[in-house]
Image: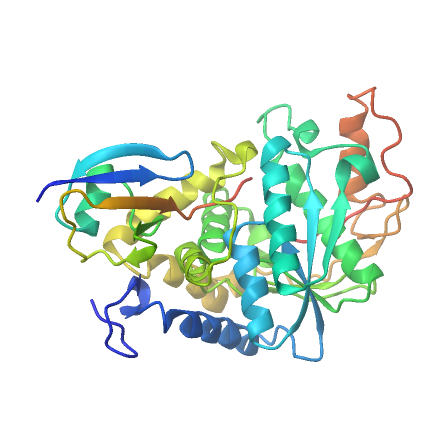
């Protein structure tokens, strides 16, 4: 297999594009894809200050790296989730990346600043804290962005993430979620940052290859809390289909965004107001974050008053 | 075609697998090609690259996520 740019032996095949690239040409191709996505979906400009949600994994670090190479003003934000040694290793990778490139990495420490950790947020029925973790991340990324004046939050959600989310929402006919799924979530309140997903047209394998070729030291292991998660089963199913039908995931997601979404999108404007407890934007009187933290911490008597005047969440995917 | 020595990350499980090329290797391991990256001597390999007996191969998973 040869690089379609320079005819050298290829290193990375992108089957859905019927393309392959050598290690020398691949990073430029990857960054060009990111740039096209940012431009096509009008995500942000070089005048915007971008806050990149950093996990220490391949997607977030590859995104941060690519945005900087493309000339964007991008700082990072990492949340210390308290998932044992996994969190310690991912924090170390994130800090090392920021230090190596001389970047600013904001951090929130759930245990020290808010009195709880993600493993304590396990859902009693499913035994997993993944949904709670998502709520926590959305809340804190938004809050830090608004408090520090960033105009947009960029996350490393990739094609596989978005296709798996879509697959799950279709399987369960979650029409509310289907109507809101997209690469850009506009700000509809002064305390709600714009959210964008510049990697949504790039596969998980694409960002891993970019990270490896650019020698980005990321955490390879999976979050131990995610073992057995439904999203991983959906990804496995989609990859089984992709094996014989390259491009299926892309067609599924992009086809939905171009054609399917309008069929399920509700036109009713959602009323955003400020959470009665923390002031963050929400559709309810008390936001999902405050409700969740209070509910879970009632079951953890050793941890008192975790909110410290904060909480709340924008009802965002 | 001979055995290649495979290390599967992140746990670094080791296997010896008889495989003619990278695509064959992944099929032998029962792994989807979109969910893994195959590396030899710090170089990413495409699925058509032929393997030699005694090659030291690393297989990196690329899938992440929860919920």
> Looking at the figure, which quarter contains the N terminus of chain A?
bottom left
Q: Position of residue A178 (x, y in %)?
A: 55, 54
Q: State whether residue A155 appears in this view.
A: yes
Query: Camera-side residue: A282 or A62?
Result: A62
Q: Position of residue A57 (x, y in %)?
A: 54, 50
Number of callouts in the render?
0
- Residue located 88% across and 51% down the image: A279
Query: Camera-side residue: A242 or A92?
Result: A92
Q: State whether residue A157 appears in this view.
A: no
Q: In terms of image quadrants, where is residue A265?
A: bottom right
Query: Camera-side residue: A168 or B39?
Result: B39
Q: Is residue A271 left or right of residue A137?
A: right
Q: Position of residue B57 (x, y in %)?
A: 27, 45
Q: Is residue A132 left or right of residue A303?
A: left
For the rendered model, the colour scheme is rainbow
Vertical placement of A75 versus B10: above or below? below
Q: Position of residue A244 (x, y in %)?
A: 23, 53
Vertical placement of A38 versus A137: above or below? below
- Residue located 51% across and 44% down the image: B65
- Residue located 74% across and 69% down the image: A151
Q: Is residue B42 left or right of residue A138?
A: left
């Amino acid at each position: 297999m040869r690089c379609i740019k320079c005819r050298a032996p290829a290193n990375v095949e992108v089957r859905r594009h019927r393309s392959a690239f050598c290690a020398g040409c691949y990073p430029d191709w990857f960054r060009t894809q990111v740039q096209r996505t940012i431009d096509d979906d009008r995500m942000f400009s070089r005048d915007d200050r971008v806050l990149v949600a950093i996990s220490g994994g391949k997607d977030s670090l590859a995104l941060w790296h690519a945005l900087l190479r493309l000339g964007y003003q991008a700082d990072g934000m990492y949340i210390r989730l308290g998932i044992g040694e996994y969190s310690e290793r991912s924090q170390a990778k994130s800090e090392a990346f920021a230090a190596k490139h001389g970047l600013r990495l904001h951090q929130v420490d759930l245990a020290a600043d808010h009195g709880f950790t993600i493993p304590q947020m396990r859902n009693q029925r499913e035994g997993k804290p993944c949904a709670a973790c998502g709520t926590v991340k959305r809340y804190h990324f938004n809050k830090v962005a608004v408090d520090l004046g960033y105009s947009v939050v960029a996350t490393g959600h990739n094609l596989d993430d978005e296709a798996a989310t879509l697959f799950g929402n279709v399987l369960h006919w979650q029409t509310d979620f289907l109507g809101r799924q997209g690469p850009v979530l506009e700000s509809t309140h002064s305390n709600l940052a714009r959210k964008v997903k510049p990697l949504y047209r790039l596969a998980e394998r694409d960002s891993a290859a970019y990270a490896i070729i650019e020698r980005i030291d990321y955490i390879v292991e999976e979050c131990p809390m995610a073992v057995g998660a439904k999203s991983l089963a959906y990804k496995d199913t989609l990859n089984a289909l992709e094996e014989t039908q390259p491009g299926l995931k892309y067609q599924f997601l992009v086809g939905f965004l171009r054609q399917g979404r309008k069929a399920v999108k509700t036109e009713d404007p959602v009323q955003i107001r400020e959470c009665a407890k923390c002031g963050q934007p929400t559709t309810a009187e008390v936001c999902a974050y405050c409700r969740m933290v209070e509910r879970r911490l009632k079951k953890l008597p050793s941890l008192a008053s975790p909110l410290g005047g904060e909480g709340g969440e924008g009802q965002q995917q | 075609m001979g055995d290649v020595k495979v290390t599967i990350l992140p746990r670094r499980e080791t296997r010896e697998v008889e495989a003619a090329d990278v695509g064959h290797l992944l099929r032998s391991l029962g792994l989807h090609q979109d969910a893994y990256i195959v590396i030899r001597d710090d170089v990413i390999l495409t699925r058509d690259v032929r393997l030699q007996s005694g090659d030291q191969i690393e297989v990196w998973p690329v899938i992440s996520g929860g919920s």
